[in-house]
Image (tube, coloured by chain):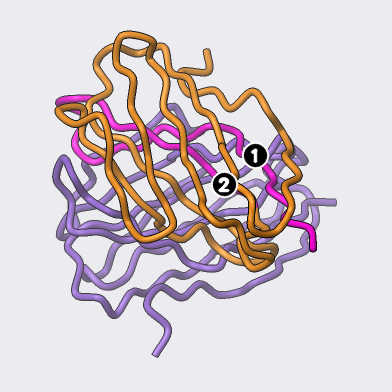
Chain colours: A orange, B purple
Amino acid sequence: DQQVKQNSPSLSVQEGRISILNCDYTNSMFDYFLWYKKYPAEGPTFLISISSIKDKNEDGRFTVFLNKSAKHLSLHIVPSQPGDSAVYFCAARATGTASKLTFGTGTRLQVTL
Amino acid sequence: DTAVSQTPKYLVTQMGNDKSIKCEQNLGHDTMYWYKQDSKKFLKIMFSYNNKELIINETVPNRFSPKSPDKAHLNLHINSLELGDSAVYFCASGLGGTTDTQYFGPGTRLTVL
């Protein structure tokens, strides 16, 4: 039972354009969401997070949007750069589950010149 | 000055063997984790320790036994290795709590022949 889903396994975007990565979840107890970025042969690195009390969080070129009613979140990267090429994982935490994260299967982003 | 380190990076072994993966963090975090990323790239939590105490124990075969000698170390012992144990294992650490950001090690690729 996959509670966090990233339905697009890959995405290709031109340098300078916007990248939009999507994530859907099914568990209504999730109240904290994170995005991680992963390069080959490295561990995931934290990118940005959002609490369920907010609908938007911005950090430089990265913005995460949360639509609780649709159980959907998205990561926007503007402008996209070649160094952004990586696999992006969406993760979620449910209330009362200590610090357990549930991850999606990732979306591979390729930023082309 | 690596924050979360794992050894070895690659581990190739025969079925039935017993092996260990070591993890150390120098971030001063109280909580450490083990995750497994299987062939479908699904990253799933296995265990979590807080100050040397087990706080998360997912449905993992009891052939897997975490050991935390101190809060900076969390090692993973695997007995009687099976083909299905082949995966990438990630260690992570964090402060714990509901808005915890977890910091991941580079991963250990385990191949069971």
Q: How many marks?
A: 2
**Residue A72 versus residue A62 in the image, above or below:** above
Q: Secondary structure at mark 1?
A: strand
Q: Secondary structure at mark 2?
A: strand
Q: Nearer the viewer, residue B15 or B101?
A: B101
Residue B70 image point, x, y percent: 22, 71
Q: Residues within 10 Å of mark 1 (few under 14, many from 20)?
A: many
Residue A29 image point, x, y percent: 24, 16
Q: Which residues are magenta?
A: A87-113
Residue type at mark 1? Thr
Residue B29 in magenta? no
Residue B29 image point, x, y percent: 20, 67
* Residue, disc 2: A88
Q: Residue at x 40, y 73 (%)?
A: B4
Q: Residue at x 78, y 48 (%)?
A: B15
Q: Residue at x 78, y 51 (%)?
A: B112
* Residue, disc 1: A107
Q: Residues within 10 Å of mark 2 (few under 14, many from 20)?
A: many
Q: Earlier in the sequence, mark 1 or mark 2?
A: 2
Cβ atoms at labels 1 and 2 below 8 Å apart: yes
Residue A24 image point, x, y percent: 48, 20
**Residue B5 versus residue B46 in the image, above or below:** below
Q: What's the chain of the residue with tag 2?
A: A
Quadrant holding the N terminus of chain B: bottom left
Q: What's the chain of the residue with tag 1?
A: A
**Residue B12 versus residue B112 in the image, above or below:** below
